[in-house]
Image (tube, rainbow, N blue to C red):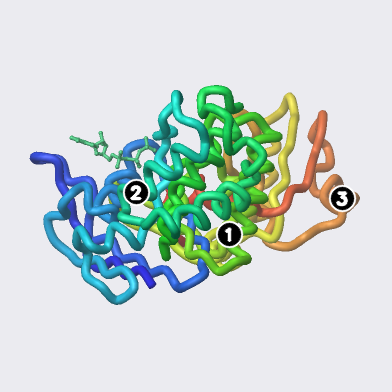
Amino acid sequence: MLQIANLCKAYGQKAVLHNLNLNLAPGEVYGLLGPNGAGKTTTIRILCHLLQADSGSVTICDRPLSDATKSLIGLVPQENLQYACLTCEENLHFFARLYGISRQQRRIQVPACLESVGLLERAKSLAETLSGGMKRRLSVAIALVHNPKLLILDEPTTGLDIEARIELWRLIRQLQNQGMTILLTTHLLDEAERLCDRLGILKQGCLVAEGSLASLRQCIAAQEIVVVRTTAEDKAIARAQTLGFPCRRYGDDLAFWLPEALEMKDLIDRFDGIPLESIARQPVRLEHIYDEVLKNGMN
Ligand SMILES: Nc1ncnc2c1ncn2[C@@H]1O[C@H](COP(=O)(O)OP(=O)(O)OP(=O)(O)O)[C@@H](O)[C@H]1O
C-alpha cells in the first residue's frame, strides 16, 4: 500500500536519506526507528508531500506522490496541532472542512471519530481543557477525520505519562484491528516492540535493518542475555571470553550473550571463583538488537 524506492534527500550539502527503500502492506503496523537526526521526520515530510525528495519514488495505494495523495494520509505530528480555543468537535469540523468533507458527512464522521478515540463525552470541551493524553487522542481523531488509508504517528507517546501512553497504545491496537495501515516513529523501543508488526532501523539516512522482531533477533547470536554485577569485571570478561560468550555494555550493565539457554545453576558454575553480586538472565529484546545494529551493523 506504500512503496518507497531509492529515496534520496539532502539539505544543501548534507545528505540525510540515502536510497531508502521501504514497503508497507495493507493493515501493517511498521515502526521506523533510529537515533535523533537519522531521517525519520524527513521521510514523513516527504510522504506527506510537504518536502520534495531529490530522487527516488513513492507510491501510496498505487498512486505516485502528489498533492492529491495527501488525502490518503492522516498525520499525527510530534506537536499537537489543534486549536486550544475550539472545542473537540469544532476542531474536527474545522479540519474536515479543509478536506472538503460536506456538512452532512461531517455530522456522521465527527462524532464517529471522537467516539473511536474515546472523546465523545468531551465533544463540547475546549481543547485547552484536555489532559495531555486526551490532546494526543484528539490529534489522532483529527488525523482520521478524512478517512485516510495510511496513518502516520510521529513519536505519538512522547511526553505522556504511563496511563495516557497505555490508553494510546490501546487506541493504536484498535485501529490496527480495524485494518488501518500505520507507520509510526518512536524512540521508545518497548512501545515499538508492543505495537509493530515490522520494524526498520534508520542510521544516518540508511535503512540498516528491517524485519519482524523475530527475524531481527537473528542479528544477535544469543538465545539469552545475562547481566552480571561484580567487583571483578575484568575476570568476568576474561572468563566469558574463554566460554565463548560475547561481551557487551548496555548502559552501565555488563552483559554477555549466551549462545544457548542455560539453567541458572549452570550459569553460576560457569562463573565459579568470580565474586558475583548479582546475575540475571534476560530475553533478547529490541533494545539489544537496536544497540547492536547501530554500533556494529548487521551480523
Ligand atoms: N530544514 C532543514 N534544513 C537543514 N537540515 C535539516 C532540516 N531538517 C532536518 N535537517 C537535518 O536532517 C537530519 C535528519 O533530520 P530528521 O528531523 O529527519 O531526523 P529524525 O530522525 O526525525 O530525528 P528526531 O528523532 O530528532 O526527530 C538531521 O541532521 C537534521 O539536523
Q: Which mark is residue 264?
A: 3
Q: Earlier in the sequence, mark 1 or mark 2?
A: 2
Q: Earlier in the sequence, mark 3 or mark 1?
A: 1
Q: How many marks?
A: 3
Between label 2 and label 3, give the one nearer the viewer: 2
C-alpha gap between disc 1 and disc 2: 23 Å
Between label 1 and label 2, give the one nearer the viewer: 2
Q: Position of residue 72 (x, y in %)?
A: 35, 62
The residue identified by callout 1 is: 175
Furthest residue toward left: 12
Furthest residue toward bottom: 62
| Residue 158 drawn above or below residue 258 | above
Ligand 1's quadrant is: top left
Q: Residue at x 63, y 48 (%)?
A: 169
Disc 3: CA contacts within 10 A as few (<14), some (14-19) or many (>=20):
few
Q: Position of residue 238 (x, y in %)?
A: 64, 41
Q: Residue at x 80, y 39 (%)?
A: 279
Q: Return the residue nearer the eye: 72 or 209.
A: 72
**What's under tag 2, amino acid-wise?**
Arg
Disc 1: CA contacts within 10 A as few (<14), some (14-19) or many (>=20):
some
| Residue 261 drawn above or below residue 34 | below
User: Is the residue indicated by label 1 positioned so its CB lies within 8 Å of ligand 1?
Assistant: no
**What's under tag 1, amino acid-wise?**
Leu
Q: Secondary structure at mark 3?
A: helix
| Residue 142 drawn above or below residue 159 | below
Q: Residue at x 84, y 42 (%)?
A: 272
